[in-house]
């Protein structure tokens, strides 16, 4: 019998939407935290480069309807719902 130690890292799937691409990776919690930290630093650097005297973004760019993140979230949710529907119609549940 193989016992897993509580300290052993477990891989879980992480879906990344970046630059129009979707990637699914198996990562540990530590790896996911490092990726989030690096992304946060990159965004903070970009915000610092933005000069305070510049014109703000247009309302179209700021609109949540045109936010690329919300589009990715909608696509991800749609895929999830389609998979859930397929699983619900599979043999043990479908009569």
Image: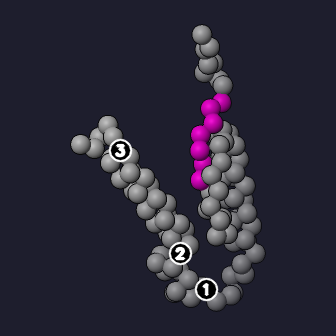
Q: Kindly identify which residue carries mark 3.
A: 90
The residue singled out by tag 1 in the image is 56
Which structural element holds mark 1? loop
Residue at screen point 38% across, 46% down: 87
Residue that mark 2 sits on: 67
Q: Residues within 10 Å of mark 3 (few under 14, many from 20)?
A: few
Disc 3, SS: loop
Which image quarter: residue 5? top right
Check disc 2: other Cα within 10 Å, few if <14, some if 14-19, many if 20+: few
Nearer mark to the viewer, of 3 and 2: 3
Q: Which residue is found at the position 62% from the left and 32% from the top?
A: 10
| Image quadrant in which you'd find residue 8 | top right
Left or right, 42 with respect to 74, comes to right
Q: Earlier in the sequence, mark 1 or mark 3?
A: 1
Q: Quadrant of the N terminus?
A: top right
Give me the C-alpha separation between circle 1 and circle 3. Answer: 51 Å
Q: Residue furthest top?
A: 1
| Label number found at residue 34 | none
| Residue in the image at 32% along x and 48% along y | 89
First to last magenta residue range? 9-15
Q: Can residue 33 be seen in the rendering of this structure?
A: no
Mark earlier in primary sequence (1, 2): 1
Q: Position of residue 68 (x, y in %)?
A: 56, 73
């Amino acid at each position: 019998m193989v016992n897993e130690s509580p300290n052993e890292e477990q891989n879980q799937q992480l879906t990344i939407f970046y630059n129009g691409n979707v990637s699914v990776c198996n990562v540990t919690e530590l790896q996911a935290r490092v990726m989030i930290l690096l992304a946060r630093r990159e965004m903070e650097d970009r915000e610092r480069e933005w000069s305070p005297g510049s014109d703000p973004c247009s309302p179209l760019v700021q609109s949540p309807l045109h936010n690329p993140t919300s589009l990715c979230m909608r696509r991800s949710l749609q895929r999830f719902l389609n998979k859930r529907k397929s699983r619900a119609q599979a043999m043990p549940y479908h009569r």
